[in-house]
Amino acid sequence: MPELMVDVITSLDGFSSAEGWPGLWGMGGPDYFAWLEQDAGAEDTVLMGATTYRLFAGFVESGEEDMSGLTTMDKVVFSSTLDEPLAWANTRLVRGDAVEAVREMLRDGHTSLRTIGSLTLCRSLVAARLVDRLRVVVFPVINGATGREHFYTGWPDVVLETVEHRTFDGRLQMMEFVPRVVDGPPG
């Protein structure tokens, strides 16, 4: 049965980006990039919203970032603002309710799913209790003054069971969890 993984990169204080900082906070390294390249070869279908699609498709178009691994993967974009045909190869547009579409893909599909970026999409999938795995790579920086897009704002309470962890390049922390949405504090 297919699974859904939410994939996240954040600063230590939970921001997905920060004003004036380069991509990956300028801290990506050879171990991390090798892992990403290996991970990009997975057979998963990638889920994203319009903002993430525009960003990554722009990288592909400009040649600014090597997105070849991601380009070959099947991608689904949930958007009411984009129009077909989409320029990025192997991408299809879904205009309907993302939660219902993902629920159907998990029920009827044969390929596991994963998100990339897409804060609103991730939040709605967690709240709908559809997420089987949550994988977070924490970059060793605090963006208290410059942080944009706090990833966990608006999430329900979630208890996490750690199933894997790893350090890349002596500084980046990857943690993978099985999430369980709870209705409130225990007891």
Image (cartoon, grey):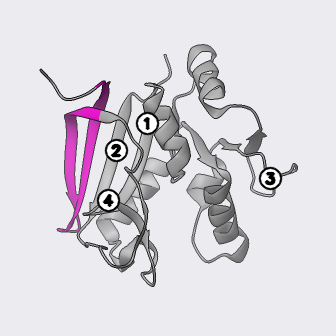
Measured in 3D between alpha carbons, the distance from the residue under mark 4 to the one under mark 1, in whole angstroms, is 18 Å
- Residue 5, numbered label: 1
Q: Which amino acid lies under the numbered mark 2 shown in the image of this protein?
A: Arg
Looking at the picture, how far across and down is residue 9, in whole percent? Answer: 38, 58
**At 54% from the left edge and 51% from the top edge, which residue is drawn?**
118
Measured in 3D between alpha carbons, the distance from the residue under mark 1 to the one under mark 2, in whole angstroms, is 7 Å
| Residue wearing tag 2 | 135
| Residue wearing tag 3 | 82
**At 42% from the left edge and 81% from the top edge, which residue is drawn?**
21
| Chain-order first, disc 4 or disc 1 | 1
| Chain-order first, disc 4 or disc 3 | 4
Looking at the picture, how far across and down is residue 96, in whole percent? Answer: 74, 32
What is the magenta range?
A: 158-183
| Chain-order first, disc 3 or disc 1 | 1
**69 or 179, which is in the foreground?**
179
Q: Which amino acid lies under the numbered mark 1 shown in the image of this protein?
A: Met
**SS label for mark 2:** strand
Asked whether the beta carbons under mark 4 and mark 1 sit within 8 Å of each other, the answer is no
In the rendered structure, the answer to whether residue 16 lies left or right of residue 178 reads right
**156 or 69, which is in the foreground?**
156
Measured in 3D between alpha carbons, the distance from the residue under mark 4 to the one under mark 3, in whole angstroms, is 28 Å
Asked whether the beta carbons under mark 2 and mark 4 sit within 8 Å of each other, the answer is no
**186 or 26, which is in the foreground?**
186
Q: Quadrant of residue 185?
A: top left
| Residue wearing tag 4 | 14
Measured in 3D between alpha carbons, the distance from the residue under mark 2 to the one under mark 3, in whole angstroms, is 28 Å
**SS label for mark 4:** loop
- Which one is closest to the eye, mark 4 or mark 1? 4
